[in-house]
Image (cartoon, rainbow, N blue to C red):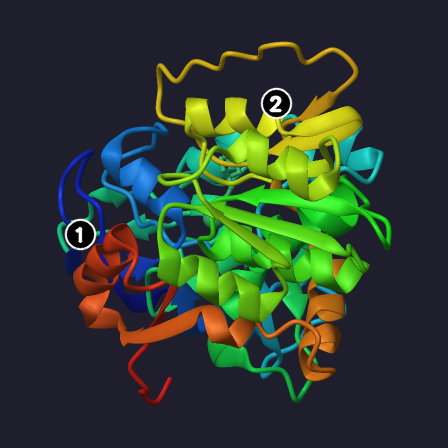
Amino acid sequence: MTTSVHAAVLPDVGKSFVFEDLTLDDIEPDEVLVKITAVGLCHTDLAVQSGDIPGAFPFVLGHEGAGVIEKVGDAVTGLQPGDAVAMSFAACGHCRNCLAGKEAYCLYFMPLNFGGIREDGTTTLTDSEGAVVHGNFFGQSSFATHAIAAAKNVVKLPDDAPTEIAGPLGCGIQTGAGTVLNSLDVPAGSSIVVTGTGAVGLSAIMGAKVAGATTIIAVDIIDSRLEFATTLGATHTINSKNEDVTARITEITGGGAEYGVDTTGVGPVMASLLSSVGFGAKVAFIAVSKPGTTLDVGLFSGKTIVGGIEGDSIPQNFIPQLINLYKAGQFPFDQLITTYPFDQLEQAIDDTRTGTSVKAVLVMPTTES
Ligand code: CXF
Ligand code: ZN
């Protein structure tokens, strides 16, 4: 049976979202139908809108969805209608990287998450004229009242989890925290620099505090964000508009930090991070850079650079861990979130671009299903 959904459709690159009623296909045996409760807005949605990452148009974006399962396919085990879930990225599950437990590096990550089609090439959405609208963005397309996802790409939430704000755990928040806790595996007592204090950077800072890093340096150009970073665990802040980043970090750490995370994707910021870490340091670049961005690597001998995806997370393991840390008061990700009604998507985008909101979450209207 198909489902009528209300969705925000991106007609093409550079256009605004248009709200439309669409028809969502029936699920396949390995899929679930999720009634979306709320969905986070991630900079990757905006990168597709601006054309910095290619997409398939018209396209329903949204990839930080959380909600309640309405229907499960015949082959699905371990999930049932009524389960609260967060949705995460799509991975094929059978390529060499997936088989090695590295699903964030699925060889088919880009087509599965940005291609607008299921793995078997079919599409899931049509408009009122019967024309194809691309869905399956990050295996979900959750800027809509319902979404289809492969069962393996959803994470069952504990009964007392905050479903309304859980969606961003599936992308931005796991990316920041996971980069520190999984990709870099930062040890207690170490020093780390995080450039950019958006949702991903602040999640990296919270992750660094959880890891027990004792020198956590936040770099940004907005003083209010740096102050916020301090409340979440940053021990030092640097406004790179006013201060020499490398000189300050060298002074604070006595010769260069041990770990670095760039969440800006801006060439000169990444270069300053590279020159601010010492020999033996490990640096993760995790933002989407604008096409044409160049990086002056300087003298990076003795340093390791990784281009991480999704914080090397295995969402089914990592998201429940983050929720446990949240419940223990050690990972207050709720403080990053500003909620908006779904129909205020454009306002949420404006506030995200201007920095008024750190992590916008769009809450779906409550209706009988
Ligand atoms: C994305 C960024 C672009 C590459 C794949 C992962 N992260 C999430 O928004
Ligand atoms: Zn994202």
Which is more toward the observer, 125 or 214? Answer: 214
Q: Nearer the viewer, residue 234 or 349?
A: 234
Q: Is residue 95 visible?
A: no
Answer above or below: position of 154 versus 60: below
Report the amino acid beneath label 1. Answer: Phe
Query: Of the residues tagged 2 and 1, which is closer to the observer?
Result: 2
Tell me if label 2 and label 1 are in contact, CB under 8 Å.
no
Q: Residue placed at 23% from the left, 40% from the top?
A: 58
Residue depicted at x 20% and y 33% = 13
Total numbered badges shown on the rendered structure: 2
Residue 232 is situated, as x and y percent measured from the top left of the image, at 58, 68
**Residue found 46% across the figure and 69% down from its top:** 336
Question: Relative to residue 165, is residue 310 drawn left or right?
Answer: right
Q: In the drawing, does residue 331 fall left or right of residue 135? A: right
Q: Which mark is residue 17?
A: 1
Looking at the rendered image, the quarter that the N terminus falls into is bottom left
Mark seen at residue 275: 2
Q: Amino acid at mark 2?
A: Ser
Q: Is residue 218 left or right of residue 129?
A: right
Tell me which residue sits at (75%, 20%) in the image. Answer: 303
Choose between 189 and 79: the one closer to the eye: 189
Q: Is mark 2 within 8 Å of ligand 1?
A: no
Q: Secondary structure at mark 1?
A: loop
Residue 256 is drawn in which quadrant?
top right
Q: Quadrant of the C terminus?
A: bottom left
Which of the marked residues, 2 or 1, is nearer the chain's N terminus?
A: 1
Q: Is residue 271 above or below residue 4?
A: above
Residues packed near mark 2 inside 10 Å, few (<14), some (14 to 19) or many (20 plus): many
How far apart, in angstroms, are the residues tagged by discs 2 and 1? 40 Å
The percent coordinates of residue 283 (x first, y second) are: 68, 31
